[in-house]
Amino acid sequence: MLTLKQLRDDPEMVVRKLAKKHFDARALVEKVIALDDRRKACQQESDNLLGQQKKAAAEIGALLKQGLKAEAEAAKAEVASLKARSNELLALAAENQKELDDTIVLLPNLPCDLVPEGKTAEDNLVVKMGGPEPDLPENALPHWELAKKYDIIDFDLGVKITGAGFPVYKGKGARLQRALINYFLDKNTAAGYLEVEPPVMVNAASGFGTGQLPDKEAQMYYAGLDDFYMVPTAEVPVTNIFRDVILDKDQFPCKLTAYTPCFRREAGSYGKDVRGLNRLHQFDKVEIVRIEKPENSYAALDEMVAHVEGLVKELGLKYRILRLCGGDMSFTSAITYDFELYSAAQGRWLEISSVSNFESYQANRLKCRYRDESGKMQLVHTLNGSSLALPRVVAALLEDNQKEGYIEIPEVLRPYTGFDRID
């Protein structure tokens, strides 16, 4: 979340920057500042009353020594009255603080200056394109038809077992999933990321820490009996490793990678964009997470983008990199780069990765800090990226590598799959 200091130091800057996300922040910013003013006034008045209490309490003993019982009783009554009023003020200050806390989390993260103007995905900026043009046979099939033809993914069986959006991978389809997971993890660990295997259910504090709560609870699967949420991405449990942590300066950079199944309700999604693997409720993803000092976070972001690009290049797929406009960014991100693969069989681009810098927004929720050179406590910057999400990678791999009578496996995956074609 934004810090109170950001709002108080330059409220007009906050309003202006959030307008780039098409978020009207003025009323919320003014409310937060007013609540903080009231909290401070209550606290200051309570502190003044505390001083009066101490002074009156000190006089009671002297009055009693002088035999002035009536005056001493009056002083005691005054102390009790001051204490009661002080407690009322402290309660009011706590109420104002609670309302302030509940309000400030409704403000999105500020977009950085590199974020382009725009409202929708059509306004995103293409910063790079690469990869070969697919050479498809006549009457090329979309991946859901290829999956059926070669009996590697069964969408109907998934509907029977659970429901739409929960496919069953079979034979070489299951082996391809496992191969991609291991390939991505191996590439990430070779790049210096520590592999971790986190839980796939998290508590509400973890959801709050990375910004899924209270913003995205409608998109998360919830186990009410235990008050747990199924993870929408490994970002949530991995980043929460650093919740309430104070890092030493020699611990930077913190680089972690993890594979998890991911669960998203995708409420409101329908139509042609949800066919096959295009949009699932359960899917596999490998994630990279970095915790950085603020001065290093944008260099780290560039490294992460280059790393993900390297993965896509090695798979031999046509891709493009987008810098998201303000209106298409997430609630918590300061800047996001999306990677998309081109599906020639579907004639459309498929998003397969988002790489984002959240600056101090998540860190403030997480209370993840470090001591700078002067010994002062500072918030870290958090970053993460898909490296990679499997469903649309698999869709593009199947579609773009289809030949007459078989699907060719990219060379880099063959040591992991143990086969070079699906037929």
Image (cartoon, rainbow, N blue to C red):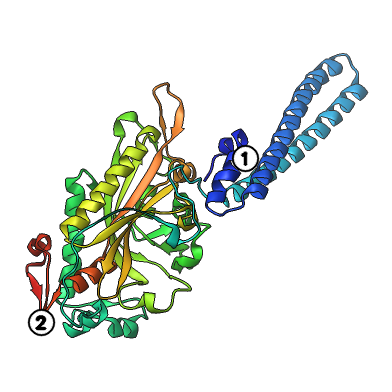
Decide: few, some or many residues near mark 2? Use Cα within 10 Å; few <14, some 14-19, many ≥20: few
Residue 392 seen by the camera: yes
Q: Which mark is residue 405?
A: 2
Using the rendered view, name the quadrant where residue 158 is placed: bottom left
Say which of 404 and 224 sits in front: 404
| Residue at 89%, 17% in the rendered image | 67
Residue 256 seen by the camera: no
* Residue 361 position within the rendered picture, expressed as x and y whole percent measured from the top left: 47, 44
Decide: few, some or many residues near mark 1? Use Cα within 10 Å; few <14, some 14-19, many ≥20: some
For mark 2, give the secondary structure: loop
Which three-letter amino acid code belongs to the residue tagged 1?
Answer: Glu
Relative side of 295 to 144, left or right: right
* Residue 352 position within the rendered picture, expressed as x and y whole percent measured from the top left: 30, 62
Name the residue that disc number 1 marks: 12
| Residue at 11%, 78% in the rendered image | 406
For mark 1, give the secondary structure: helix
Say which of 278 and 175 sits in front: 278
Which three-letter amino acid code belongs to the residue tagged 2?
Answer: Gly
